[in-house]
Image (cartoon, rainbow, N blue to C red):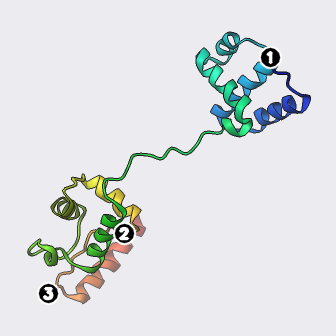
Amino acid sequence: MKKEYTREEKLAIKKLMRKTKNVVMHKKYLVIHLHMREYTNKHIAIIVDLDVQTVGIYIKTYKNHGVDGLIPKKSPGRPRFLSKEQEEQLYKTIVGKTPDEVGFDGLKNWTAKIACQWVYKEFGVQYTVNGMLDLFHRLDLSYTRPTYVLEKADPVKQEEFKEKFEEEKKSY
């Protein structure tokens, strides 16, 4: 049975089609617009360059849920490797302890590589270094490499060097 669309529905789709900057949404609105103009699904698929089945899905979704049904949902993404509790334990360990306090003798600064080893030792979950850096970001941990200062360096000579260096930078 064919559904008759009201003038307001047709105008609303046309308005949405003109207003959107999202290419995918424009295509979905165009499918609905053409359907309202009584094109067949096969012809719509050819015009819009979609599969006939996809056209049918868009139309069915619109009929059942209206315009809001066409808006894509946020994808949940891949499940996390560590539970919330494990992530909290990792956070507390990194913030509150040094690596040598948790079994990495002689190491004073946390690195992503050390954190990977600790997570594997504690939870049996293997992370890549990049994966650990992503986890640091999610946990609001900033990652910086430690800088070293020579104890025996002459502060006067260092200042002279900095001044000369700044002058050299300006001359280029």
Amino acid found under the numbered disc labelled 1: Lys
Amino acid found under the numbered disc labelled 2: Ser
User: In the displayed image of the protein, which residue is found farthest to the left?
Assistant: 105
Considering the numbered disc 3 on the image, is that residue within a helix, a strand or a loop? loop
Considering the numbered disc 2 on the image, is that residue within a helix, a strand or a loop? loop
The residue identified by callout 1 is: 2
User: In the displayed image of the protein, which residue is found farthest to the front?
Assistant: 1
- Quadrant showing the N terminus: top right
Q: Nearer the viewer, mark 2 or mark 1?
A: 1
Residue 80 percent coordinates (x, y): 36, 53
Amino acid found under the numbered disc labelled 3: Lys
Residue 42 percent coordinates (x, y): 66, 10
Considering the numbered disc 1 on the image, is that residue within a helix, a strand or a loop? loop
Placement of 136 over or under 60, stated as above or below? below
**Which of the 4 quarters of the picture holds residue 83?**
bottom left
The residue identified by callout 3 is: 152
Residue 149 percent coordinates (x, y): 21, 80
Number of residues whose C-alpha sits closer than 10 Å to that of mark 3, classed few (under 14), some (14–19) or many (20 or more): few
Q: Nearer the viewer, mark 2 or mark 3?
A: 2
Mark 2 or mark 3: whose residue is earlier in sequence: 2
Number of residues whose C-alpha sits closer than 10 Å to that of mark 1, classed few (under 14), some (14–19) or many (20 or more): few
Q: Decide: marks 2, 1 in contact (CB < 8 A)?
A: no
* Pick the front one: 63 or 41: 63
Relative to residue 82, is residue 22 drawn left or right? right
The residue identified by callout 2 is: 142
Q: Residue at x 89, y 33 (%)?
A: 8
Mark 2 or mark 1: whose residue is earlier in sequence: 1
User: In the displayed image of the protein, which residue is found farthest to the right?
Assistant: 7
